[in-house]
Amino acid sequence: MAEAHPKVVVVVPTYNERENLPILVGRLGELGMPNLHVLVVDDNSPDGTGDVADKLGAESGGTLTVLHRTEKDGLGRAYIAGMTKALDDGADIVIQMDADLSHPHTAVPAMVEKLTTTDSSVVLGSRYVPGGSTASEWPWHRKALSAWANFYVNAILQLKVKDATAGFKAWEAQALRKVDLPSVRSNGYSFQVEMNYRVVKRGMRISEVPIRFEERVEGMSKMSLGVQLESAVAPWKLRFGK
């Protein structure tokens, strides 16, 4: 008997992504992956992204669902809500993916294959392994800041991965259960670091596959000064916290 395809749920948090979301959903559909689902987690976007997501869901034949939240509560909270729902709905694999088209959809099959054919519990879409790259539009100082952030995080937490701040990830369902989602404290982009740290502390393996990280075309970046400060402090809290 042929082995059933695992249920793969791509969790996509959105806030004012009405232009990008239909493109992303279309690209994921073009992959032709069996049992691939999309879960949009919308934080009450003022631009009507939630309505766009509902329309896409109605047209999807049941492969796209929407989780509406009442307020903008941070990337980490949105991911935790989406991951929790994905697990409750029977996901075997959960993928974190941004709505701004910066994460290449073409890497999803390779990430899933790596997860299902090795002892990896998490697979990162990595900019800093051989074959990976950042957007050519990035100025030198932004590339330097990204590289420094990864060095900084690894120096403090010893994660031993090349792209410690990556937000494009594929998770085994069991790995998500082991990290204890309800107790995750970080929000913002430091959420990615805390999740990696919890994986390593629990003795699970993180693998990486190369991606080219693209710059968003539509909409505005969510990277504020407050988010940057939180991200700088978070590794120390994790290192010396209880």
Image (cartoon, rainbow, N blue to C red):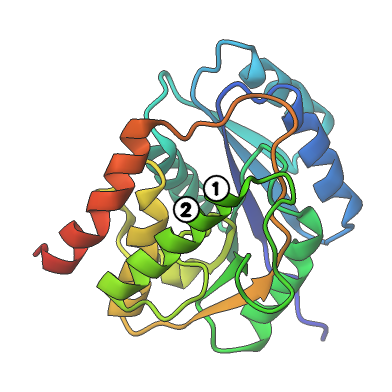
Q: Where is residue 21 shown, x and y percent of the image?
A: 73, 31
Q: Amino acid at mark 2?
A: Leu
In the displayed structure, does residue 198 sit left or right of residue 85? left
Q: Where is residue 172 shown, x and y percent of the image?
A: 53, 70
Q: Check if mark 1's residue and mark 2's residue have beta carbons within 8 Å.
A: yes
Residue 142 image label: 1
In the displayed structure, does residue 236 sit left or right of residue 6? left
Compare residues 233 and 47 and report the one nearer the observer.
233
Q: Amino acid at mark 1?
A: Arg
Quadrant of image for the C terminus: bottom left
Compare residues 163 and 90 and report the one nearer the observer.
163
User: What is the quadrant of residue 198 in the picture?
Assistant: bottom left
Query: Regarding mark 1 in the picture, which secondary structure is present there?
Result: helix
Figure check: 220 above or below 142: above
Q: Where is residue 180 shown, x and y percent of the image?
A: 30, 61
Count the labels in the image. 2
Residue at the location (82% across, 61% down)? 34
User: What is the quadrant of residue 178 in the picture?
Assistant: bottom left
Residue at image mark 2: 145
Task: Work out how far the residue at label 1 is from the one at label 2, CA to CA, in angstroms.
Answer: 5 Å
Compare residues 141 and 202 and report the one nearer the observer.
141
Query: Regarding mark 2 in the picture, which secondary structure is present there?
Result: helix
Quadrant of image for the N terminus: bottom right
